[in-house]
Amino acid sequence: MEAAEIESMVESMARRARAASLALATASREEKDRTLRVLSELLEKSAPRLLRENRKDLDAGKAAGLNASLLDRLALSEKRIAAMAAGVLQIAELDDPVGKVLETNERPNGLIIRKVRVPMGVIGIIFESRPNVTIDCAALCLKSGNSCILRGGKEAFHTNTALAALITEALKQGALPPDSAQLIPTTDRYALHCLLRMDACLQCIIPRGGESLIRFVVENSHVPVIKHYKGVCNIYVDKAADLEMAREIVVNAKCQRPAVCNAVENLLVHRDAAEWFLPEIARSLAAEGVELRLDKEAAAIVKTAGDIPFVPATDEDWTTEYLEPILAVKVVASADAAIDDINTFGSGHSDGIVTADKEAADRFLAGVDSAAVYWNASTRFTDGFEFGMGAEIGISTDKLHARGPMGLNELCSYKFVITGQGTIRS
Amino acid sequence: MEAAEIESMVESMARRARAASLALATASREEKDRTLRVLSELLEKSAPRLLRENRKDLDAGKAAGLNASLLDRLALSEKRIAAMAAGVLQIAELDDPVGKVLETNERPNGLIIRKVRVPMGVIGIIFESRPNVTIDCAALCLKSGNSCILRGGKEAFHTNTALAALITEALKQGALPPDSAQLIPTTDRYALHCLLRMDACLQCIIPRGGESLIRFVVENSHVPVIKHYKGVCNIYVDKAADLEMAREIVVNAKCQRPAVCNAVENLLVHRDAAEWFLPEIARSLAAEGVELRLDKEAAAIVKTAGDIPFVPATDEDWTTEYLEPILAVKVVASADAAIDDINTFGSGHSDGIVTADKEAADRFLAGVDSAAVYWNASTRFTDGFEFGMGAEIGISTDKLHARGPMGLNELCSYKFVITGQGTIRS
């Protein structure tokens, strides 16, 4: 496609998405849920076709030399398709976020001002190779009354095209505007560039993927973006920590699922706790196959404790999201030093303190400038489901609009609905 | 200043603002209010010096040929300085938005998840020539625990520099970090460009001014922006409207203060109401000196009603923010046609319906995609003070974060504070 052709196609998609969003904004819960149930059924019924299309992407991916972990992300299976279909049904079960009166304020002049939750309008979702994102995001946008424009990675193009066709079919069968969810039918980067300039029609862009993709979106978008670049999560073990509790929390936060953004990457230990805690935790983590990267002080202590393997930490370790069984460890002089360290090198995602000292905990929870701050708990809970939101479209480390896990409510805006009796301003 | 010098200066300001914001985030209400009271006193005491500095700007403005309305915006007076000082005291009286627990959620695993309101961090305020914005915005940011970087227009440079010196002095006397509020000490456009790229330190940019300034900010910022371009407000008079109520509302919304963003610019009248309503409202508005711009159908009706002056409307009229005693008027076939028209040509700011028909009102209030939607009231109420927020830093027609008038709460974000008892994820 030529540039001008891409531009006019993306503009047309955005305009149609905006028109659809105005209808979708006042659709009833029943209409939206019915459409989601149709989509779930279509997914189940279409498994053979989806697997065939996915096979094309997998073959192309192998030929292009994608690594095993990328191919795994890309792969569909009967089980994964069933999980997608079940996920859509779960979204249908959730309360409708739209129309809720958030505040009512009766003014002295008799005006009644209601703050009412409404959809945002049109949301652009930019993602990479996991095809389930296509279905998840379309379903969450639909449930929250938003149109969406989906832009997936080129590796999953055939799979996404097949999934998008099912979404369109579900919208038709559910008698909702088919333009409510549209996949950009080209993986040309210029289409993304054009989409990011459609601020006349789009209200929000949510990029999901690696840091460089998200950076590109932030630097080129005229549409507001909600994002997180990465999760470099820290746990600080205070001098007043319960040793066994700290050990369990750190092992859980590192090992329970290392490849996710809320897994811990850095451990900070108070100097007064280091001598008894560090050898203990180092042994536990080594037993779990975790590679330890230690600062000088931590290394000196671990070395005296016998034959525990580690490597020296470099400056880069404190800002690196490993997403692997690796943990960087340093010794700090105080809770305040830990707070400074986390505010300087962390990513503002999820950070915790382990301590029995309420005052130290309060300082930490107030002083650490992160989306989620934990006292005596694993960082692994930063997640829409664990927070009781029932769903998650992503996690934000921004401070505008939504911070932390984002569910259906966070896909919405509000409007002020004001009722008078011929009320005028004097 | 050379470009590299400007760049490093802005970067240094942003880093210092970020460091100050971390201290300010945990400052007590008493510390913040004390500082605001000092600032208010300093303003009162410094009137002669402020007037001298303002005189330099006014003289330069006159020499540069600024028009009378711009010079009026720029001018300080004893009275305006006293009003600024009083405004700062009023902000000190408002509740502290920071630290409020917005939600508490106890999970089945024993985790207690609190959603707590916290400052955003560092806010950039971009404005033009009204010097009171410098003080208003600095005071609102301080009260909400945010550092701010102020970038004013070149016309008010001497005045703003003098005002910023008072803010710095108040911060020092109040024992809060002096870097909490900083004015960019150059009006070189490159400094603004640099500021918009400091997304590592700034959380939010609020531009206040004309559409072209705001457009520049949106197109160049890597920092999230909250804005409104303009207010093209509409009132729709339904066939079931009370004639006298509609007349009063339209006259109020147009004439009470035409130069503000919530004044009405377009009037839509249902065809069935046009014959009795249009001559009536045209006469009332003409008597108030309002220029009427009528579509063909409205013109034909008004023409038959005798000697009421008007001009024909052009296509541009429906999207123009006059900010003057001018009103564009058209006849529509139905409430739905009015809704479509407003969603197509309006600015998503404030739009109202006048009707006695609840069903038509409900359709309108749900269907019009604007920050504030009114039933039987003037659009002039869209304002932080009228909404009971006690303050206003601006109005947003965005849907992310804040929509409509923004007060202290809207200058804040939230964080999740999670307490466990050694809780780990299974």
Image: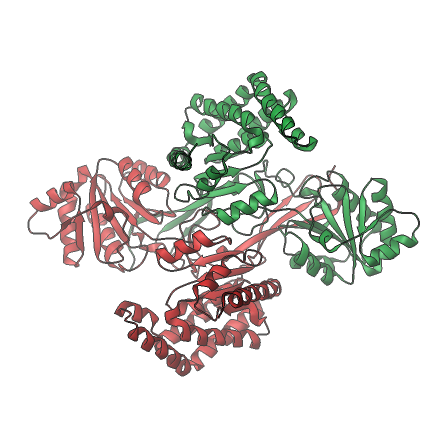
Chain colours: A green, B red
Q: Is residue B93 visible?
A: no
The C terminus of chain A: image quadrant? bottom left
Residue sitting at 27 percent across and 71 percent down?
Answer: B65
The x and y percentages for residue B180 are 55, 68
Q: On the rendered image, what quadrant is the N terminus of chain A found in?
A: top left
> Which residue does the image show at 41% across and 63% down from the upper left?
B127
- Residue A322: x and y in percent read 71, 44
For the residue pair B406 and A347, the one nearer the viewer reads as A347
Residue B399 is situated, as x and y percent measured from the top left of the image, at 44, 46
Q: Is residue A168 visible?
A: yes
Whether residue A284 sits left or right of residue B204 in the image: it is right
As drawn, A316 above or below B12: above
Quadrant in which residue B61 is drawn: bottom left
Q: Nearer the viewer, residue A230 or B382?
A: A230
On the image, the x and y values in percent for residue B302 come to 11, 46
Number of numbered discs present?
Answer: 0
Q: Is residue A211 above or below residue B212?
A: above
Position of residue A365 in the picture relative to residue B207 (left or right): right
Residue A178 found in image quarter? top left
Residue for point 73% across, 38% down: A257
Relative to A204, residue B2 above or below: below
Q: Which residue: 36% across, 56% down?
A: B212
Tell me: residue A130, above or below residue B38: above
Query: Image check: B400 left or right of A213?
Result: left
Q: Quarter-wise, where is residue A384 in the image?
A: top right
Q: Nearer the viewer, residue B359 or A223?
A: A223
